[in-house]
């Protein structure tokens, strides 16, 4: 119940403000309504901006969040925003599971290319893109998928910021296998896993689905192929940097999986 959690956090912020707190930092690993960051058509809200306004009105001085759907959401909040990345955590796990020389990083659509490029820098792997054309009359459904890049015989790592119903990811995986991929691993920061994601992903040819615990994942939404990594070390380090007047940016400047492995 994301609305309940948001409301509880707003009430907590208000309570702290009325208790004369010197500074209020809101830690929200998953930024609610982040996908509604612009008007996709007329008479639609920009809910991501509304979220920022609500927390500002409640009394928040600073936001800390992980892997926003789009980076420009940082500009919606009038104050410091610490935008953290789960990439070091996820890429370290992927490196431990697959031979780096065989990995190809896959962007599931054109909008995720920047995220995928960061993965290619860390893993030293080539990039491929799945070009998709949506049906404008059917929400959240994809019509045609084409692979741009060579994936034959490769271990494909599909990277995204979140997995909701899993439809796009499963169709992307099937397209990759149709193009000769040897294996498909999925890595995403936020595991929303709305129905029927668990069943879809478990029954697919994907070998592993890796997410972090930015959102609590109920037992009935878990499945054998799912790996849940703890985001706590990254959040803990970021909170420490903020409260000791250190640098949050420095945490991600030299993102190398070997460095991550040595620190955990």
Image (cartoon, helix red, strand yellow):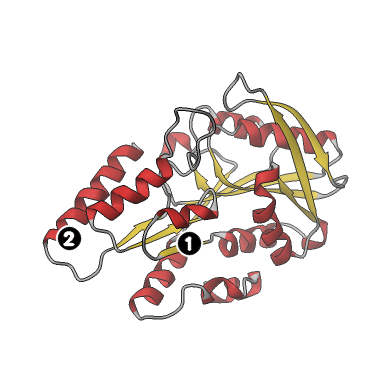
Sequence-first disc among 1 and 2: 2
**Front-most of residues 117 and 39:** 39
Residue pictured at 45% horizontal, 27% vertical:
43
Quick one: label 2, few (<14), some, or many (20+) residues within 10 Å? some
In 3D space, how far apart are the residues under numbered discs 1 and 2 (Cα atoms)? 23 Å
* Mark drawn on residue 83: 1
**Front-most of residues 7 and 169:** 7
- Where is residue 65? Give x, y as percent: 43, 57
Asked if residue 216 can be seen in this view, the reply is no
Question: At numbered mark 1, what does the secondary structure look like: helix, strand or loop?
Answer: strand
Q: How many dots with numbers? A: 2
**Front-most of residues 225 and 36:** 36
Quick one: label 1, few (<14), some, or many (20+) residues within 10 Å? some
Q: Is residue 49 left or right of residue 258?
A: left
- Where is residue 79? Give x, y as percent: 36, 63
Question: Are the two marked residues, 1 and 2, in contact with CB atoms closer than 8 angstroms?
Answer: no
**Quarter of the figure with the N terminus:** top left
Residue pictured at 52% horizontal, 54% vertical:
72
* Mark drawn on residue 16: 2
Asked if residue 128 can be seen in this view, the reply is yes
């Amino acid at each position: 119940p994301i609305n309940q959690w948001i409301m509880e956090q707003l009430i907590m912020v208000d309570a702290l403000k009325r208790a004369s707190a010197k500074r209020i930092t809101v830690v929200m690993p998953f930024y609610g309504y982040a996908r509604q960051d612009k008007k996709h058509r007329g008479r639609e809200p920009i809910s991501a901006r509304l979220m920022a306004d609500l927390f500002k009105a409640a009394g928040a001085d600073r936001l800390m969040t992980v892997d926003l759907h789009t980076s420009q959401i940082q500009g919606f909040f009038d104050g410091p925003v610490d935008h953290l990345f789960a990439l070091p955590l996820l890429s370290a796990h992927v490196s431990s599971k697959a031979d780096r020389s065989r990995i190809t990083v896959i962007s599931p659509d054109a909008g995720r290319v920047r995220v995928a490029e960061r993965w290619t820098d860390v893993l030293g792997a080539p990039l491929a893109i799945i070009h998709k054309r949506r049906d404008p009359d059917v929400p959240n459904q994809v019509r045609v998928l084409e692979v741009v890049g060579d994936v034959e015989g490769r271990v494909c790592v599909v990277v995204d910021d979140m997995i909701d119903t899993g439809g796009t990811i499963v169709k992307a995986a099937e397209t990759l296998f149709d193009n000769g991929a040897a294996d498909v691993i999925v890595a995403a920061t936020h595991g929303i896993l709305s129905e029927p994601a668990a069943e879809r992903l478990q029954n697919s040819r994907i070998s592993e689905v890796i997410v972090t615990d930015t959102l609590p994942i109920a037992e009935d939404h878990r499945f054998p192929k799912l790996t849940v990594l703890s985001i706590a070390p990254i959040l803990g380090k970021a909170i420490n940097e903020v409260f000791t007047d250190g640098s949050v940016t420095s945490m991600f400047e030299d993102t190398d999986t070997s460095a991550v492995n040595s620190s955990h």
